[in-house]
Amino acid sequence: MTPRFPILMYHQIGPPPPRGVPGRSLTVPTADFVAQMRWLKRLGYRGVSMRDLMPYLKGEKQGRAVGITFDDGFRNVHANAMPVLAELGFTATNYFVSRQIGGSNVWDRAKGIPAAECMSKTELLEWQAAGHEVGAHTLTHPRLTEISPDEAAREIADVRAELEAICGEPVEAFCYPHGAVDETIRRLVAESGYGNATTTVKGRARASDDPLLLPRITVRRGHPWPLLLLKCLTA
């Protein structure tokens, strides 16, 4: 049987906003995240960044690995997720919106989602120094399929250059904002030199998948642990 590896998708880690607030489900309480990571460890899984997951996907490594990814570069991930990742020896990828480093999720404003701070440059470098991966999530978080190809190319290529200038190492991982991708956008990501890219398509990744169209499993607030585990095993 071809091995399949779950890639978990998180956004914010911390106290969720009040009931009825848009986007509430994408903030996973810290205690829930800690429990999820510790259970993965107990069950023999290794939590890994996309950089560390790729050798498993390519068949160069064997074992029970789970990709851990965070979209948008939120500050509460630095504060609330990093300690348990360090405790367990896990690595993770955070996809940064380069023009909002030290800013906030301005792209969510029209949806009524509350403002949330993004990591500063210092915090991004602390994330990197802890062994985690800096991934790219465009310059400004647009829906790439709804802007011109020239503008999309700039969003995809320039974010890589900006992040590499900050962290001083190659940025290989990309994530499509809003999950918006088509043949043109995928080609632009390839032309920009990324080694892998994740989507919002549900499922577990396997060696036969296009490395620039990898599926993930969204983790939401209130996600019962047995259900999350079932998704990891059967998605």
Image: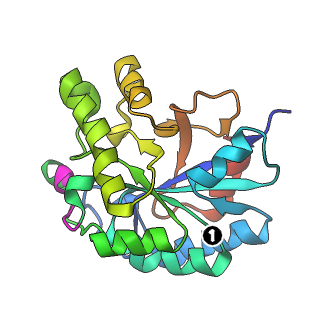
Does the magenta-highlighted stretch encompass residue 26? no
**Span highlighted in magenta in the image:** 102-108
Say if residue 234 shows up in the picture. Answer: no
Q: Is residue 230 left or right of residue 71?
A: right
Give the residue number, with chain letter if any, for mark 1. 37
Q: Is residue 77 left or right of residue 52?
A: left
Does the magenta-highlighted stretch encompass residue 107? yes
Please determine whether, in this image, residue 125 is positioned above or below residue 212. Answer: below
Query: Pointer 1: residues within 10 angstroms few (<14), some, or many (20+)?
Result: many
Q: Residue at x 72, y 62 (%)?
A: 46
Q: Quadrant of residue 184?
A: top left
Please, what is the three-letter code of the amino acid marked with disc 1? Met
Q: Residue at x 66, y 40 (%)?
A: 235
Q: Secondary structure at mark 1?
A: helix
Q: Please state, as top left, top right, bottom left or bottom right, where the N terminus lies in the image.
A: top right
Residue 41 picture location, percent across and down: 73, 70
Coloring scheme of the render? Answer: rainbow
Q: Residue at x 73, y 48 (%)?
A: 233
